[in-house]
Image: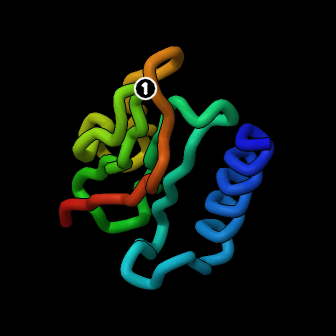
């Protein structure tokens, strides 16, 4: 069930990014999107070259077998390049987020 919900949330996040809608208005950045893979173990961000940002990355809260972690981040990337987090398969999964972070 969690896998289906994660997949649905990922599809919703991408769809909302394309249409300009957002879950929380503070998270909306025109031309950018964030998401999580189907298993909930890798999160990502993407900003188009037309977005006007100079770099972007994603931030998420990971749940490990031992409990919540502090925030984790994907690598800073230039517009037009996807930013991926490490793969947390076998050790944890995305519990909250991801949220996009940009630099103008």
Q: Is residue 56 left or right of residue 64?
A: left
Comparing 17 with 95, the one in front is 95
Q: Tag count in the figure?
A: 1
Check the image and report above or below for 73 versus 32.
above
The residue singled out by tag 1 in the image is: 65
Quadrant in the rendering for residue 13: bottom right
Q: Residue at x 73, y 45 (%)?
A: 7
Q: Residue furthest bottom?
A: 25
In front: 85, or 2?
A: 2
Q: Is residue 19 left or right of residue 56?
A: right
Q: Residue at x 71, y 42 (%)?
A: 2
| x, y percent for residue 84 | 42, 33
* Image location (x, y in percent) of residue 29: 41, 72
Q: Residue 12: where, in percent of width, then height?
A: 71, 62
Q: How is the image coloured?
A: rainbow
Toward the top, the furthest residue is: 90
Name the image quarter holding the C terminus. Answer: bottom left
**Image quadrant occupied by the N terminus:** top right
- Residue that protrudes farthest toward the left in the picture: 104
Q: Nearer the viewer, residue 58 or 95?
A: 95
Residue at 46% x, 27% y: name it: 92
Q: Residues within 10 Å of mark 1 (few under 14, many from 20)?
A: few
Q: Is residue 13 above or below residue 10?
A: below
What secondary structure is marked by label 1? loop
Q: Looking at the image, is 88 positioned above or below residue 29? A: above
Residue 38 lies left or right of residue 75; in this view the side is right
> Where residue 96 sits in the image (x, y, percent)?
45, 54
Residue at the image point whose x is 48% and y is 66% from the top:
31
């Amino acid at each position: 069930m969690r896998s289906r919900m994660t997949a649905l949330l990922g599809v919703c996040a991408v769809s909302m990014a394309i249409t300009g809608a957002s879950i929380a208005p503070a998270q909306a950045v025109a031309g950018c999107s964030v998401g999580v893979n189907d298993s909930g173990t890798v999160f990502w961000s993407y900003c188009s070259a037309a977005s006007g940002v100079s770099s972007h990355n994603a931030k998420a809260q990971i749940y490990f077998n031992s409990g919540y972690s502090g925030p984790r981040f994907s690598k800073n990337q230039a517009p037009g390049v996807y930013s991926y987090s490490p793969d947390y398969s076998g050790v944890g999964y995305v519990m909250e987020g991801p949220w996009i972070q940009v630099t103008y």
